[in-house]
Every structure is written in C-alpha cells, then in structure tokens.
Amino acid sequence: MPIRSMTGFARVSRSTPSGELVLSIKAVNHRGLDMHFHMPLDFDAVENALRAAVRKRIARGHIQVQVNLRRVDGSAVATVINEPLLRAWLDTFHDIARRFGIESQPDLNQALRLPGMMESRAEHSAMGSPADESMENDALAAAAEALDQLDAFRAREGAAIEDEIRMRSASIREMVQRMEEIRSRALPFFQQRLRDRLGEMLGSTQIDPARISQEAAILAERSDISEELVRLKTHADQADALLSAEGETGKKLDFLLQEMNRETNTILSKTGGLGETGLCLTDLGLAAKAEIDRIREQALNIE
C-alpha cells in the first residue's frame, strides 16, 4: 500500500428526493484520529454510521465532515415552534427578572435560535424519530464517494512526499560514505597532533615513537565515529524500507528520525578539535542533520 498524506479535501454532491445533499471532508495532520461532524439535526441519527465509515478508511488525522441539504423547490419542510420549550424559557426569564429586580423584556429572536426551539413538522409529529432509511443511505453513499476522492488526493500527495524522503535518505547515505573516507585518513593527524603537544610539554626530551603511536591510537578510538556512521546508514536504509511497508508509517518514521538525529549529534560531539579533518566531518554532520530535519517536516504529514 502506498503511503498517504494526512492532508486532503473532497466534496460530493448528490441529488435526493429531499434536495441536493452536499458532503465534504477536510483532513489535516494529527497524532491520532480526531473526527468532527457538522450536520443538520435531520442527520443526527446518521452520525455513528458516518463515523464508522471514516474510521474504516482513515487511521490518523484531524477530520472535519460537513453535511448540508439544499432543499429543492416545493420540498421545503414547514417548521413549527417547540411551544413547551418556549414556554419554559419564558417562565425562567420572567422568574429571574422578578427575583433580581431586572426590568427587561425577553428577546424572541434569541429564543428562536436556541437548539430545538424550531422543529420541522415531520420531527414535531414523530416526536424526534430518527432520519429515515433513504436519507441514511444517501449520506453513506456520499461519504463513500468522498472518501474515495480523499484517498486519491492523499495518495498523490503521499507519492510526492515519498519521493522527497527517498532523495534525502540517499543524500544522507552519500554523506556517510564521505565521512567514512575522511575518517580513514584521520589517524596520521592524531599522531602529529599528539607529537606536537608532547613536544611543547617536554621540550628537547626524546619522545618514544611507539608511545606516541599508542597514545594517538587511544585518542583516535575516543574520537572514532565508525559505529555512529554504520548506524546512521542503517537507519537511512530503514527509512526507505518503512516507505514500502504497511501500517502507520508516520509514527514509525518519526521514531527512526529521532535515532538518526541522536547519531548525528554524537558524530558532531566527537569531531570537535580535530583541525581541518574535524571541520570537514562537522560540515558533513551538520548537512546530514539538516536533511534529517527536512525529512521530519515531511514525515509529520504521513498517515
């Protein structure tokens, strides 16, 4: 399965007996699956089915589902006022005004905006019955079509992200190879640096060449970055493998990038004070670190 971006948008319009049903889905990146639905009250009973449909297709992301029904001419549903609710609201208003000595008149416009104050005649007669079966089928069909569009959108963006990550992983492997070549030439530098330091300390005293070689080898071992380079190259290979694997690639890749960043930090800490050789290694380590950061920016949007 190709990787998919967590960002996308889809919009579907369907003609129904009640009017034009418009369903849109907007997705952005998120650590988990966070769904939000904005629908008319007529569709409340359909929400659980829509949630299940989205959950089957999307593993991660902040998902906003918007449903609107544009009623055609002649299909407008008459509305009635929920008189018991209005009466209770007015009684409460007058009671509070009397108890606190407030001289004020109720605002009818404000009252009519209260949830449940205005009902369709069908809702009023059925006393809150759920949306009929045809409405649910229409909404689920529109959701399935929108999810197909969203998947196609996210797959296209995911392919572009994958290409960039593979390119930057290859760049990191190239930098590792160059650092390995530089490291292999570092021992003579350690020997010369140690000879110069000991010469300054001991003046004209004869220095045993074998002792210099031994101390230089110890110094080289302390500054050796071979293990870090091997792990960094291995992690770059693993990043490519994750892009071809199934499951939540984004989370696994984020953990792997943390390990790669740790290796580059260790390399940078070991290459300080090594003269021109160290500067070359430091430049390559910083470049590798920059590539890792760019991969992380892209990985944050992978499902």
Image (spheres, helix red, strand yellow):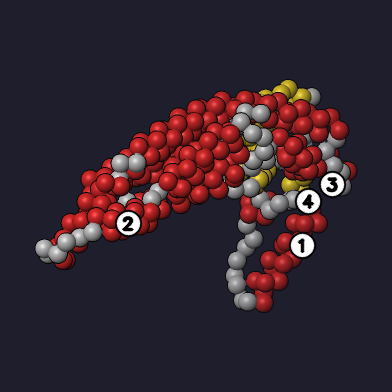
- In front: label 4 or label 3: 3
Looking at the image, is 109 positioned above or below residue 283? below
- How packed is label 3: few (under 14 Cα within 10 Å), some, or many (20 or more)? few
Q: CA distance from mark 4 to mark 3?
A: 12 Å
- For residue 74, say whether it is visible: no
Q: Give the residue at mark 3.
A: 128
> Hey, what amino acid is under mark 2?
Gln
Q: Give x and y (percent) for residue 96.
A: 67, 72
Q: Residue at x 50, y 49 (%)?
A: 258
Image point (65%, 71%), residue name? 97
Q: Quadrant of residue 246?
A: top right
The mark that comes first in sequence, 4 or 3, is: 4
- Disc 4 marks a residue whose amino acid type is Asn
109 vs 69: above or below: below
Q: Which mark is residue 88?
A: 1
Mark 4 = which residue?
82
| Residue 5 position in % (x across, y down) | 57, 34
Mark with earlier residue (3, 1): 1
- Element type at mark 2: helix
